[in-house]
Amino acid sequence: MTFEQARRCFPVLESIAFLNAGTFGPLARPVVEAMEAALDRDLAEGRSGRAYFEETIALRDEVRRSFASLVGVEPERVALTGSTTDGCAIVLRGLGLEPADEVVTTTDEHFGLLGPLGATPAQVVVVPPDAESILAAVTPRTRLIATSQVTWTTGAALPLAELREQSGVPVLADGAQSVGAIPTDAGGLDFLTISGQKWLCGPDCTGALVVADPARVSVTSPSYFAQRRHEPNGAFDPQPDARRFEPGWWSQPTLRGMLAALELRPEWWFEHAWAAAERCRALLAPRFELVVPPARSTLVAFRPGEEEPEAVVARLHEAGVHVREIPGRGLVRVSCGWWTSDGDLERLVAALDG
C-alpha cells in the first residue's frame, strides 16, 4: 500500500488535518465497512444461536492473536478489555496491595492509570518521568512500578524493560501512547495495557491487557469469560490464561472492526509516523517552545506563548485542524500518525500563524 492509498482509507483526511490519534485515531473505511456488514447481519439474522456464539468466541481468539503478534507475546498472555484504564484497574485490584506497600509512578501519568492507583490502599510515590528518578524511588516496600511507556504529556519514552531488570520490581506499563505508535515488545514487562481506538484506529471501547504470569494476579471482577465452569454458589474454575481477566463481551461488529484495523497497517507505518513527527518539530521550532523527548516519539508538544492552549485548540478546530491541549501544563499536543501528510502539517502551521 502506497502512502496515497493509505490516505484514501481515511475519509476524514479529505477535509480535516487529523492530528489527535493520542485521543482517538481516525476511522478507516475498511474498519467501518466491516462493522456495518456485521451490524447488517445482526439486524437481519439476530444475535443468537450456538453457531453465532461460537463464531464470536472464534473472533475473540483471532483478535487476541493479532494483539499478541503486535507486541511479541503468546496469545495466552492477552486479555481483551475495554480500554487501558480497564487493564490498569484489573492489575491493581488483583495484586492485593496493602497500606504498607509502595507503588512508584510519575508526575506525567493520565488519570486512566492514576485513578486505579488512587483506589488502592498502597502508598503512591510520585517522581519525575525519567529512569534515574524512578530507580531512586524504589525501596524494599515497592511492590510495583506503574507508569507510561510513552507519556501522554510530552511523548517522552521510558525504558521500562530495563527498569524492570535493574530494579527487580514488577512493572505495569500503560501502553496508551506506545502500542501502535512506536515498536513495542511486551517482553521484560509484567503487565502492558493496549488501547484499540487510539494509534491502532480501532472501534471505541477496545483494548487489551498483556500479563506475563496470570496466576500471580487475583480475579477480582469475574465476567462470564473468566471461567471454564462454575457452581451454583458462585465458585468457579478460572480460565488457565489471561482470559480470566476479560471484563466482558465484545460485539461481532466491534471484533470485526478491530481485526480490520489491525490488518490495515502498512509495513512502513512506524517510520512514516516518526518522520512526520520530526517534520512537525522542524516546522514548529522557529515559532514556539517545544518540549522535545529524548527518544523518537510520535507526539509533539509545544507551548503556544501568550495564547491559552485551550483557545489555540478551539481556534485550530474551527480551521479544520484537530489537536488537543494538555490540561494544567500550558501545552498543545500534536499526534503524528502513518496517515499524516506534509500538507496536514503545513495546514497546522498556517492555522497557528493565522
Image (cartoon, grey):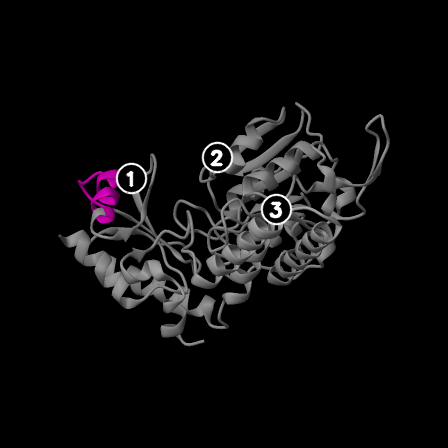
Q: Is residue 181 visible?
A: no
Q: Quadrant of residue 81?
A: top right
Q: Which residue is mark 2?
A: 111
Left or right of 247? Residue 131 is left
Instruction: Identify which amino acid the numbered label 2 is placed on.
Output: Phe
At which x and y percent is residue 58? 71, 56
Work out which residue is located at the far front of the displayed protein and give it. 44
Give the mark toward the camera: 1 or 2: 2
Disc 1 element: loop
Q: Residue at x 30, y 61 (%)?
A: 280
Q: Residue at x 46, y 51 (%)?
A: 198
Residue 288, numbered circle:
none
Instruction: Identify which amino acid the numbered label 1 is placed on.
Output: Gly
Residue 250, numbered circle:
3
Number of residues whose C-alpha sits closer than 10 Å to that of mark 2, classed few (under 14), some (14–19) or many (20 or more) = few
Residue 266 belongs to the span the image colors magenta: no
* 320 vs 3: above or below: above
Disc 2 element: helix
Nearer to the camera, 119 or 239: 239
Mark before the other along the chain sequence, 1 or 2? 2
Give the mark toward the camera: 2 or 3: 3
At which x and y percent is residue 16? 28, 56
Q: Residue at x 31, y 66 (%)?
A: 341
Q: CA distance from mark 1 to mark 2?
A: 18 Å
Mark before the other along the chain sequence, 2 or 3? 2
Disc 3 element: loop
Nearer to the camera, 249 or 2: 249
Q: Which residue is mark 1?
A: 330
At which x and y percent is residue 334? 33, 52
Nearer to the camera, 338 or 159: 338
